[in-house]
Amino acid sequence: MLDPDKSESRRREVLHAAARVFSESGFHAATTDDIARAMGLSKGVIYYYFRSKEEIYLEVVSTAIRGAQERLESVLALGLAPAETLREAIRTHLAYNLNEQEEGYYAMLVINDVRSTGSEVREQVRALQGEYVRRFESILKRGVEAGVFEPRDTAVTTLNILQAVNYASDWFKPDGRLSRDQVIEHIAGQLVASVMKWPGLATEQQ
């Protein structure tokens, strides 16, 4: 019988290797043989932990989304003012997505491959995404109610913010002109400013 701790550790290794393979080859082209080769193990080891490639993909993505949800809940629990809550939520989301040591890094690179999976996997992923979006939107709603955010459609605004945040995974380069922390602060600052209710501007528009 395998030691439970070692078994769980190996399972996480499979997921991490699979996430890298999916990000490099795409879900459709990647195979369990590719994942096994990336780990230097036999394919049988992969099937000891997972029944199929789709099951591996679902676990990669759902683990990442749950990790993002836990981090978001921690931000919400701080009880900060709406603008600071939004800023910290964006920072936290970006830090998770742009850190190669986090589950969110590779998951963001393969999340769109959900279109290549079966309907059951798509439904589960979208349900998880939907819950995250709803919790994120609660920040915008609170800011609008407090009169510090512009009274726009919070559902649309939330999706726009998350799209901008997630897109950073496509273009950010660790060895680029700006460091990861600089990119995070730049994006967070811009996005928070985009939803703020500025009294002077509001007066001019009346």
Image (cartoon, helix red, strand yellow):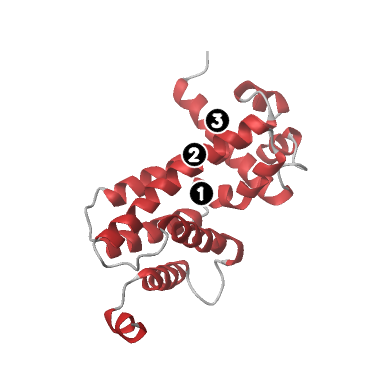
Residue picked out by circle 1: 104
Query: The residue tagged with tag 3: helix, strand or loop?
Result: helix
Up the image or down, 174 lies above or below 10; here it is below
Q: Could you say where residue 122 lies in the image, as x and y percent from the top left?
A: 62, 37
Between residue 128 and residue 109, name the one nearer to us: 128
Q: Nearer the viewer, mark 2 or mark 1?
A: 2
163 relative to 72, above or below? below
3 or 1: mark nearer the eye = 1
Dot 2 falls on a residue whose secondary structure is helix
| Alpha carbon distance from label 2 to label 1 | 14 Å
Say which quarter of the image contains residue 44: top right
Q: Say which of marks 2 and 3 sits in front.
A: 2
Q: Residues within 10 Å of mark 3 (few under 14, many from 20)?
A: some
Q: Is residue 44 left or right of residue 62?
A: right
The residue labelled by disc 3 is 11
Residue topped by disc 2: 128
Looking at the image, is mark 2 or mark 1 earlier in the sequence?
1
Q: CA distance from mark 3 to mark 1?
A: 17 Å
| Percent coordinates x, y for residue 141 in the rendering | 33, 56
Instruction: Depth check: give the residue in front, 73 or 174.
Output: 73
Q: What amino acid type should be assigned to the residue bearing mark 3?
A: Arg
Q: Amino acid at mark 1?
A: Gly
